[in-house]
Image: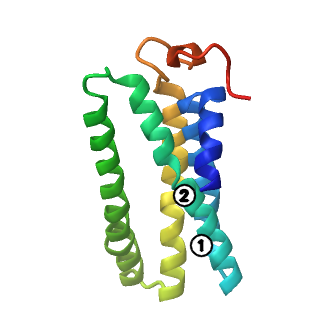
Amino acid sequence: IFVRVALGTLLERYGPVNVQCGLMLFGAYWVALSSIIFSDWSFILIRTMIGCAGASFVTNQFWCSLMFAPTIVGTANATAAGWGNLGGGVTQIFIVWCLFKPFQAAGMSVDLAWRISMLVPAVLFLVIAVIMKLFCWDTPIAKRFDVSVTGKTSKAS
């Protein structure tokens, strides 16, 4: 919950592209570290940090609100949230059936196949963060966010 609240200030200060890229890089780091989990406490710590990266839906909702007209922003937010939830489920299937099982079939031990499987999404997080930073705009008319778009006169403190 703390991350969700902090994201509001970060979004108004740095804009959705920068914040989302930061979350993706943060998530990539912790997902990559999940491949070396070795104890109960390391599992809890790493899983908690990955959960913090999951607060990216806050960025998503803020960004949709900037990108779509008021007449359709509700539909846009609902659709984006639905795709986000679907993505979480698909990821669970992808990790097992497209990575873990083939790695295991290729002769890796169960432990090694699971660990290597976690590196693939970490690399994807990095690739998407770079693509997003290079090609995405914060608003339909401006590459980078200005708080005045929201009707405010100053950035978050």
Crowd band around label 1 with a 10 angstrom C-alpha radius: few (<14), some (14–19), many (20+): some
Mark 2, residue position: 122
* Residue 109 visible: no
Residue sitting farthest toward the right: 157
Crowd band around label 2 with a 10 angstrom C-alpha radius: few (<14), some (14–19), many (20+): many
Tag 1 or tag 2, which sits nearer the N-term? Answer: 1
Mark 1, residue position: 35
Residue at 49% over, 43% down: 58
Give the amino acid at mark 2.
Ala
Where is residue 75, by image quadrant?
Answer: top left
- Horizontal side of residue 73 vs 157, given as left or right: left
Residue at 66% over, 86% down: 40
Residue 120 higher or lower than 62, as above or below: below
Which percent across, then down, holds residue 136?
A: 46, 26
Give residue 130's mark. Answer: none
Where is residue 92, by image quadrant?
Answer: bottom left
Q: Do the residues labelled 2 and 1 touch (CB within 8 Å)?
A: yes
